[in-house]
């Protein structure tokens, strides 16, 4: 059994045959030990409060790599709202349990912020060729600088062959691809389909904070996306956006923050549709004061 010294004070972890590392040194030593083995490393970055959406990424990594590493880290530099950061669910025991049930050979890396950032918890500045200024970039100041900074740190420690990101955070996925190509990080970035609850609600750690009623009402987001997708066959992007805005205005539980029908490569809003381009509808909305995002592929 290989349990990091930092978690030995949590006896429940001793049941697991898992490697759970909390320090840069431990993960560095582990990665170094795999260096000459030609083993591929699949990496799944997460902020914890793991659910089946995360699990789907982890399972894909297991089938495609010799070693899978999951990081569990609520990254302070990507939050522009202190309350959101404070309230972000932290459930490491459950996360370890869920990962252990998938496969006990998975390595978990769960450092704290001071350890990962070596006491220098600030963002670097990145240029993602404009991707960072659209949608989430307009509404969450500095968010993608925080994402870039933390992934730079994790990639340089873990040196993954493949890294797995959900299309649930589609803008993030495109930005990570840009980060890797622009800054030559040498990681293969793999996008994974959105995993949904039976109700159609996109799985999210934030769903746990919804009231039962809120969770029910939040299904409106996906329902509206599905109807809008049909409309996109015959209507302009502007008309479909207008329809979505009106539907949300009629809904007393949800507050629409933005809707954007955008080109998947540039993330810029569609002016005129072209068969050669691919589009998605992106939505951010509040319910119970909790911010949810979702999107759907159109063509
Ligand atoms: P998070 O812990 O929310 O930062 O998410 C970690 C990774 O899991 C990101 O790449 C997310 O896009 C992905 N993810 C989160 N929820 C889902 C979902 N419902 N389906 C697919 N991927 C997801």
Image (tube, rainbow, N blue to C red):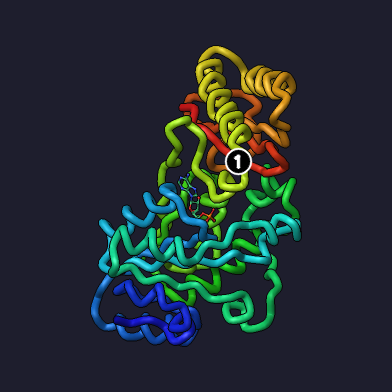
Q: Quadrant of residue 284?
A: top right
Q: Measuring from the top left, give residue 23's x and y in whole percent.
A: 50, 82
Q: Secondary structure at mark 1?
A: strand
Q: Is residue 181 visible?
A: no
Q: Is residue 293 visible?
A: yes
Is 151 left, or right, of 103 in this rendering? right
| Residue beneath the point at 33% across and 58% down | 61
Q: Measuring from the top left, give residue 272's x and y in whole percent.
A: 62, 24
| Residue beneath the point at 37% across and 49% down | 56
Is 238 left, or right, of 99 in this rendering? right
Q: Measuring from the top left, give residue 73's x and y in whole percent.
A: 55, 67
Is 135 left, or right, of 201 in this rendering? right
Quarter of the image with the N terminus in it: bottom left
Find the residue positioned furthest to the top: 234
Q: Does the numbered disc 1 mark a residue whose Cβ is under 8 Å from ligand 1?
A: no
Q: Nearer the viewer, residue 112 or 228?
A: 112
Vertical comparison of 286 with 156: above or below:
above
Vertical comparison of 119 with 195: above or below:
below
Is 135 left, or right, of 275 in this rendering? right
Q: Measuring from the top left, give residue 154's x and y in whole percent.
A: 50, 71
Q: Which residue is mark 1?
A: 293
Disc count in the image? 1
Q: Nearer the viewer, residue 206 or 267?
A: 206
Q: Nearer the viewer, residue 59 or 214?
A: 214
Find the residue positioned furthest to the front: 11
| Residue beneath the point at 48% across and 44% down | 167
Vertical comparison of 215 with 248: above or below:
below
| Residue beneath the point at 53% across and 76% down | 111
């Amino acid at each position: 059994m290989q349990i990091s010294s930092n978690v030995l004070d949590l006896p429940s972890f001793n049941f697991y045959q898992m490697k759970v590392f909390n320090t840069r040194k431990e993960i560095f030593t582990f990665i170094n030990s795999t260096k000459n083995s030609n083993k591929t490393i699949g990496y799944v970055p997460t902020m914890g409060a793991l659910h089946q959406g995360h699990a789907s990424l982890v399972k894909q990594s297991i089938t495609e790599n010799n070693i899978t590493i999951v990081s569990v880290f609520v990254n302070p530099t990507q939050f522009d709202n202190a309350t959101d950061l404070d309230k972000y669910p932290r459930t490491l025991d459950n996360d370890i349990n869920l990962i252990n049930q998938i496969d006990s050979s998975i390595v978990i890396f769960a450092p704290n912020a001071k350890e990962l950032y070596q006491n220098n918890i600030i963002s670097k500045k990145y240029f993602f060729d404009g991707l960072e200024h659209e949608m989430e970039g307009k509404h969450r100041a500095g968010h993608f600088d925080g994402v870039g900074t933390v992934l730079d740190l994790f990639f340089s420690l873990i040196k993954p062959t493949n890294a797995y990101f959900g299309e649930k955070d589609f803008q993030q996925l495109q930005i990570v691809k840009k980060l890797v190509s622009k800054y030559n990080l040498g990681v293969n970035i793999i996008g994974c389909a959105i995993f949904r609850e039976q109700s159609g609600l996109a799985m999210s750690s934030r769903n746990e904070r919804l009231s039962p009623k809120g969770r029910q009402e939040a299904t409106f987001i996906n329902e509206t996306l599905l109807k809008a997708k049909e409309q996109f066959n015959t209507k302009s992007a502007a008309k479909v956006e207008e329809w979505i805005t009106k539907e949300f205005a009629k809904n007393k539980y949800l507050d629409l923050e933005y809707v954007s029908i955008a080109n998947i490569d540039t993330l810029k809003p569609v002016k005129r549709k072209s068969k050669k381009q691919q589009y998605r509808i992106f939505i951010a909305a509040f319910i119970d004061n909790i911010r949810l995002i979702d999107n759907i592929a159109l063509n």
